[in-house]
Amino acid sequence: MVLPVRPPTLESLADSRVLVVDDDAASRELIRRILGREGLTHVTLLADPSLAASVLEDVQPNLVLLDLHMPDVDGFQVLQTIRKHAAATFLPVIVVTVDDSGEALQRALSMGAHDYVVKPFNAVELALRVRNLLLQERAYAELSRNRAQLRSRLDLFEPDLAGGTANPDEVRAIMIDTIEADRVTIVVQPVVDMRDGRPLGG
């Protein structure tokens, strides 16, 4: 009996950029091979965690896989660097470590890690965790783009705001607050002929 070939888990996210920070060469290469087999081609490997800040700027990754226990600069320090780099954006981090202690898990998550995987790990499980966070990162980026478009279109309303009785600055502030809080819902309202109820246009 021949088993069907499983399609790559990450093929639809092949343009995503992943940064792997781990001082162990075997671990770095294993992760690279797993992600490559699953469809990711833009995987950057970093052995020296002290270079994380500059590599983050150069690579602009969509996801970071991070070891915790490394010499000189440990994973917790790199987490701080990642959070500073990401600022108000969403840059997911998966900690991949041999440390299975509850203390390390809680500390990593409290410092901004989004997932925690203990070595040795299951390759398919790791790929699925990577996929889930990359999908979240992509959705966040799309939401940010939509908000930026809505903010840019506020300028179209400036003449109307100036001619109203309300304070234009206050109205604009309310509109921006509504956009940022994601309280905008797009609906389609059909236009109908009032005589017989037939939809017009389209």
Image: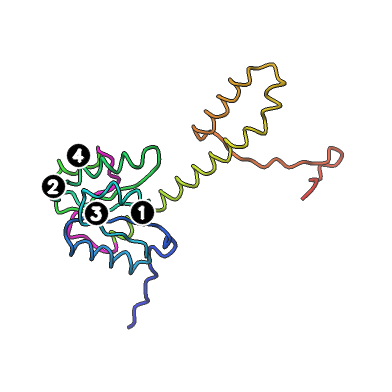
Tag nearer the camera, 4 or 2 = 2
- Tell whether 92 sits left or right of 201: left
Which mark sits nearer the N-terminus, 3 or 4? 3
Q: What stretch is highlighted in magenta?
A: 111-124
Q: Is residue 158 above or below residue 145?
A: above
Tag nearer the camera, 3 or 2 = 2
- Under circle 2, the secondary element is loop
Q: How far apart are marks 3 and 4 (CA)?
A: 18 Å
Which mark sits nearer the N-terminus, 4 or 2? 2
Q: Which amino acid does label 4 sit on?
A: Arg
Residue pointed to by mark 4? 107
In the picture, residue 81 is in which quadrant? Answer: top left
- Front residue (pair 200, 163): 163
Q: How far apart are marks 2 and 1 (CA)?
A: 23 Å
Residue pointed to by mark 3? 21
Q: Distance between the residues labelled 4 and 2?
A: 19 Å
- Tell whether 53 sits left or right of 60: left
Tag nearer the camera, 3 or 4 = 3
As for residue 90 lying within the magenta part, the answer is no
